[in-house]
């Protein structure tokens, strides 16, 4: 069963002021052009769980490890299969479609190499404004094809902002985090006959004015059996730069570029440099400081250049290859 892995943001070793958070559309809807890096643990250790609900909770996940790191980019949606979506998340050949409205952040479906699941009635994953103890129920429905057969899908989600307090990840401490619990019950039908059911439990942690969850924990049950889980946290201060209108301490020129780009740095303590495509896939990597990168072999389009410093701090900026 295709599952949505919700993607999300990082702040490096930053502590936010303590407050009870209220999510709003203006502040917390994601934006076209945002790009993040997500640390993913797709097989948490036995006994791992989401921690307690309630007020003034501390969720300490500082010992969580990542099995892989994936880039995520948010792009403008123009897919006719998802007419109500205005953005999509791109991550490793998986495209998740959403609508960003004044009242809700709505999930409209997913596109992969295996299936296109398009909703005619989307999931209101976050209704605005949303704060601790708020809750609601929403229905969703749609259809998809798999192995030449057409399936109808319908279900409900029960959403509750079930806790607030301090969230500790391996990379940051957020002292004003709000947790949202989503329980999704899904039934698929083939020619009107039930063909399978799943129950997903998803936890999103939001913090401050960051417009993406800083951590996600996901469990999926199919026909009553646990078939998958993941615990993910973000680690890319490109997100911090976007939200605080900061700029990277290195410069890339010319931009747009044709045959090469030049780099100049304020910080000389460089560990390595990466070029990523808009899906977050690594295209080129350099194990030391370089001042010129030849780009004639790159396909025309948008890319990110990421600089990782010796203290593990990283920065990235976007450039265009003509």
Image: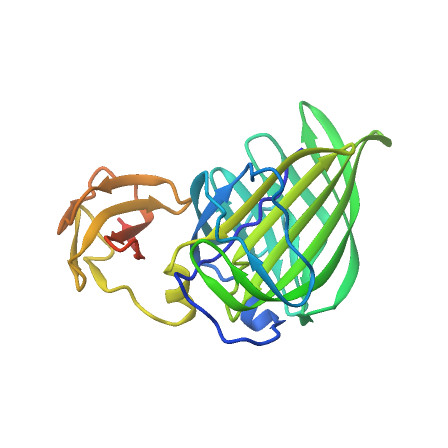
Q: Residue furthest top?
A: 147
Percent position of residue 97, x then y = 59, 49
| Camera-side residue of 286 and 195 | 286
Colouring scheme, one of rainbow, by chain, secondary structure, one colour: rainbow
Kindly indicate the quadrant of the structure image that contains residue 29.
bottom right
Q: Is residue 294 visible?
A: yes
Give above or below for 233 relative to 220: below
x and y percent of residue 196 in the render? 78, 31
Residue at screen point 50% across, 47% down: 64
In the image: residue 103, left or right of residue 305: right
Asked where in the image residue 222 lies, by quadrant, the reply is: top right
Q: Position of residue 8 (x, y in %)?
A: 51, 54
Which residue sits at x=60%, y=54%? Answer: 98
Q: Quick check: 254 left or right of 102?
A: left
Q: In this view of the protein, which residue sits in the foreground, 176 or 289?
A: 176
Quarter of the image with the N terminus in it: top right
Q: Is residue 111 above or below residue 15?
A: above
Instruction: Please say whether residue 121 is visible from this viewpoint.
Output: no
Q: Name the outermost residue toward the right.
A: 192
Name which residue lies at 54% across and 75% down.
18
The residue most toward the left is 291
The residue located at (54%, 71%) in the rendering is 27
Instruction: Between residue 77 and residue 243, name the one nearer to us.
Output: 243
Residue 132, given in percent of the width and then of the height, sits at 69, 69
């Amino acid at each position: 069963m295709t599952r949505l892995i919700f993607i999300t943001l990082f702040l490096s070793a930053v502590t936010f002021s303590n407050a009870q958070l209220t999510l709003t559309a203006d502040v917390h809807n994601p934006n076209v052009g945002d790009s993040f890096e997500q640390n993913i643990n797709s097989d948490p250790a036995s006994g791992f769980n989401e921690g307690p609900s309630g007020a003034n909770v501390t969720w300490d996940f500082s010992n969580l490890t990542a099995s892989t790191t994936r880039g995520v980019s948010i792009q403008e949606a123009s897919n006719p299969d998802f007419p109500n979506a205005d953005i999509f998340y791109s991550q490793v050949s998986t495209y998740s479609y959403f609508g960003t409205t004044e009242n809700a952040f709505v999930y409209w479906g997913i596109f992969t190499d295996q299936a296109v699941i398009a909703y005619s009635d989307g999931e209101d994953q976050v209704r605005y404004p949303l704060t601790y103890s708020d809750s609601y129920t929403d229905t969703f429905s749609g259809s998809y094809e798999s192995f030449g057969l057409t399936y109808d899908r319908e279900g409900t989600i029960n959403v509750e902002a079930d806790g607030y307090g301090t969230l500790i990840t391996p990379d940051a401490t957020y002292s004003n985090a709000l947790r949202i619990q989503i329980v999704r019950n899904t039934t698929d039908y083939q020619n009107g006959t039930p063909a399978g059911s799943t129950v997903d439990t998803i936890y999103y942690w939001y913090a401050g004015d960051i417009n993406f969850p800083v951590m996600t924990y996901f469990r999926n049950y199919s026909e009553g059996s646990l078939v998958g889980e993941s615990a993910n946290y973000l680690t890319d201060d490109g997100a911090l730069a976007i939200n605080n209108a900061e700029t990277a301490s290195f410069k890339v020129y010319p931009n747009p570029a044709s045959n090469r780009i030049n780099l100049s740095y304020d910080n000389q303590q460089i560990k390595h440099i990466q070029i990523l495509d808009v899906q977050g896939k690594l295209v080129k990597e350099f194990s030391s400081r370089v001042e010129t990168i030849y780009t004639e072999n790159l396909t025309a389009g948008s890319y990110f250049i990421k600089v990782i410093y010796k203290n593990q701090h990283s920065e990235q900026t976007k450039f265009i290859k003509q």
